[in-house]
Image (cartoon, helix red, strand yellow):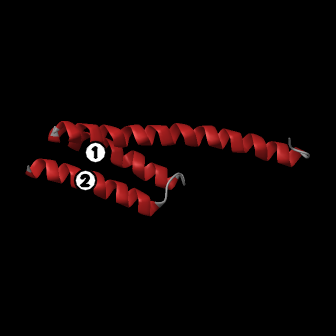
């Protein structure tokens, strides 16, 4: 347990931040999975719309420090590659 008032405050802030990060990370993963699952089903229109819905969540996760910008770029690139491959087939 915290020994000083400022340590107690930081512990409370850290817990609040952790809860918010868990919520945002869960929402991000859900959006990514929706793109992946619709691509696996072979539905190119649904996967494209899910991708357009997921991109703002990925970008906001970068701005909030949840994921690194290179990871965000990699995620978007891989998801888009799935959609392009699906549309070509």
Q: Is residue 41 left or right of residue 58?
A: left
Residue 86 at x, y = what percent? 15, 48
Mark 1 or 2, nearer chain start: 1
- The mark tally for this picture is 2
Measure how far apart labels 1 and 2 are at the Cα level: 7 Å
Quadrant holding the N terminus: top right
Residue 9 at x, y = what percent? 80, 43
* Viewer-proximal residue among 38 and 13: 38
Q: Is residue 78 left or right of residue 72?
A: left
* Viewer-proximal residue among 31 and 56: 31
Residue 35 at x, y = what percent? 29, 41
Q: Residue at x 53, y 37 (%)?
A: 23
Circle 2: element type? helix
Residue 82 at x, y = what percent? 22, 51
Q: Is residue 49 left or right of residue 10?
A: left
Q: Residue 3 is drawn in which quadrant?
A: top right
Q: Residues within 10 Å of mark 1 (few under 14, many from 20)?
A: many
Task: Please identify the residue farthest to the left as the structure is shown.
Answer: 89
Q: Judge whether 82 appears above or below 73 on screen.
A: above
> Which of the labelled discs sits on residue 51, or is there none?
1
Q: Judge whether 61 appears above or below 73 on screen.
A: above
Q: Residue at x 48, y 55 (%)?
A: 62
User: Mark 1 touching mark 2, by CB under 8 A?
Assistant: yes
Q: Residue at x 37, y 39 (%)?
A: 31
Task: Please identify the residue farthest to the front as the structure is shown.
Answer: 40
Q: Residue at x 49, y 54 (%)?
A: 67
Circle 1: element type? helix
> Which of the labelled discs sits on residue 43, or is there none?
none
Q: Which residue is mark 2?
A: 80
Q: Residues within 10 Å of mark 2 (few under 14, many from 20)?
A: some
Q: Residue 77 is drawn in which quadrant?
A: bottom left
């Amino acid at each position: 347990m915290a020994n000083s008032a400022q340590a107690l405050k930081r512990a409370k802030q850290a817990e609040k931040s952790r809860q918010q990060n868990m919520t945002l990370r869960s929402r991000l993963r859900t959006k990514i999975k929706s793109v992946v699952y619709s691509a696996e089903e072979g539905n190119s229109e649904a996967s494209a719309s899910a991708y357009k819905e997921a991109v703002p969540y990925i970008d906001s996760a970068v701005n909030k420090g949840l994921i690194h910008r290179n990871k965000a770029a990699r995620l978007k690139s891989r998801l888009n590659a799935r959609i392009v491959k699906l549309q070509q087939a």
